Image (tube, rainbow, N blue to C red):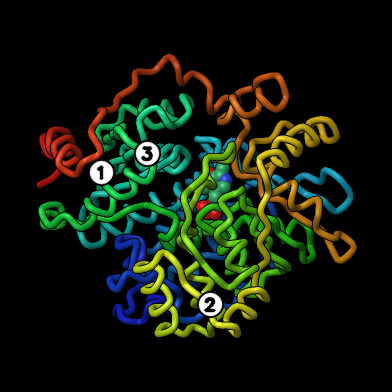
Amino acid sequence: MTMLKYVSTRGLAPPCDFAGTVIDGIASDGGLFAPAQWPRLDVAAPGQGESGYAALAQSLLEPFVGAALPEGALAAATRRVQDRVAHPLTVPLVEIAPDLFVLELFHGPTGAFKDLAMQLVAGLSEAALAQGGERLLLFTATSGDTGAAAVNAFAGADRVDLVVLHPLDRVSPVQRMQMTTSGAPNVLNLAVRGDFDDCQRLVKALLAEPGLKASRHVSSVNSINWARLAGQMPYYAAAAATLGRSATYVVPTGNFGDAFAGWAARRCGLPVGGIVAATNRNDALVRALDTGIYERSQARPTASVSMDVQAPSNFERLVFEASGRDADLTRGLFADFARDGRMSLPGDLLAALRREVTAVSVSEAETVEEMRRSWAENGRVICPHTAVALHAARRVDRTAGPVVALSTAHPAKFPESVEAALGFAPERPPQLEGLEGRTERFEVVDATLEAVLAAIGQTIFASGRIT
Ligand SMILES: *Cc1c(COP(=O)(O)O)cnc(C)c1O
């Protein structure tokens, strides 16, 4: 079997294989991993049926994994994804108006699309670590959805301990309970007295902490992890197989991981037409493509909280690709960005970026309006993230072909927003039922590295799990 290598978008890290990208998460030069060549993927993928999604995901991801993992590891991980999703079609595609579709990605155990990739990554991580007899200490900062998906995916894992940092009292009760009720001994939840940016800052500091790195691999499951992106490609293939023709995909966007997975699917030859990244009023991407200036700004709170991102981390991957894989240029631009919080895109790069994707911003009023319209016209209760995408999707010209809006979360995860827009609370699906009856476990800590390290020391380290 071939062994596809991965290179860094910044060009200074040594290439590694798929297992290396899973365990390390980020390249040693601070860049993001990209496959050294894009494989050509077959559009004649198996349809959706009994073993549909798992088989499709396996055949699609095989070229990316190659011989980097033991035989059978990928098949087991894709099977696990399908088994944990409570819908026979895994990712049903629903037509709500002529040639306007909603791709439902929220039937996983925590009700968000992040389950689909996170369950896969958990399975692949265990396989990658088992090969070298290694262990991994994983950190994640979360505003809600990532933490819930990560806890569900990694609870009970043999070789991984997971520490999740969420901002105290700033995640919804459903999201908090999804993180804190697993009962798994390898999961530590920390409620940080601060905001999401404090949590992210602390994770960065933890990853650089020499005392932690000495004993084992230390990494983070955030959206720049290559395996998470790869794990989002199969549902574009599933939708394309169901439609049997090319479509425009409208993706509710925060860190641009989901949208980049669609771009990658197209790059590999799948019938994906346009990619439209729909953001809320946190619109750094939209401004970059409009003006050529990519600039970090203060995150502004919205109803689509999982998209409240100041600077989408996967934008670096798009810059790398649109520049013709110019790692020197990419490194220079992101050095400017790290220093100044701002970069200026050269004219030819900007033109190339505009050929690859389009981006639109949707206001808070438009989001609520879309939640109401979707209920009134289509009888569908949707979450605010999905509303951002659907609002943008309705504005795309459908004479050229179908338009698919990605639906990324179950509305029951955001009952307050739904109730405010529609006047009633959404129904909870069985997988989100019963949370209130379970015991919650989390520790409240100050937003300092010392406090977090002390909490980790008293729990995970004291349990003897770290040797
Ligand atoms: C994370 C998330 C998004 C944004 O996805 P990115 O890959 O970060 O662009 C959109 N919707 C929901 C519900 C999410 O949890």
Is label 1's Cβ within 8 Å of ligand 1? no
Which mark sits nearer the N-terminus, 2 or 1? 1
Callout in the foreground (3, 1): 3
- Residue 195's mark? 3
Question: Observer-nearest residue: 162 or 444?
Answer: 444
Kind of residue at badge 2: Leu
> Dividing the image into 4 quarters, which one contains the N terminus?
bottom left
Q: Identify the secondary structure beneath mark 2.
A: loop
Query: Residue at coordinates 68% horizontally, 76% vertically from top-left?
Result: 355
For residue 439, side relative to residue 342 (left or right) = left
- Circle 2 crowding by C-alpha within 10 Å: few under 14, some 14–19, many from 20: some
- Residue 345's mark? 2
Query: Residue at coordinates 28% horizontally, 41% vertically from top-left?
Result: 163
28 in relation to 383, above or below:
below
Residue that numbered label 1 is attached to:
161
For residue 41, side relative to residue 33 (left or right) = right
Task: Report x, y in % for residue 210.
Answer: 12, 57
Question: Observer-nearest residue: 158 or 457?
Answer: 457
Q: CA distance from mark 3 to mark 1?
A: 23 Å
Q: CA distance from mark 2 to mark 1?
A: 40 Å
Q: CA distance from mark 2 to mark 3?
A: 31 Å
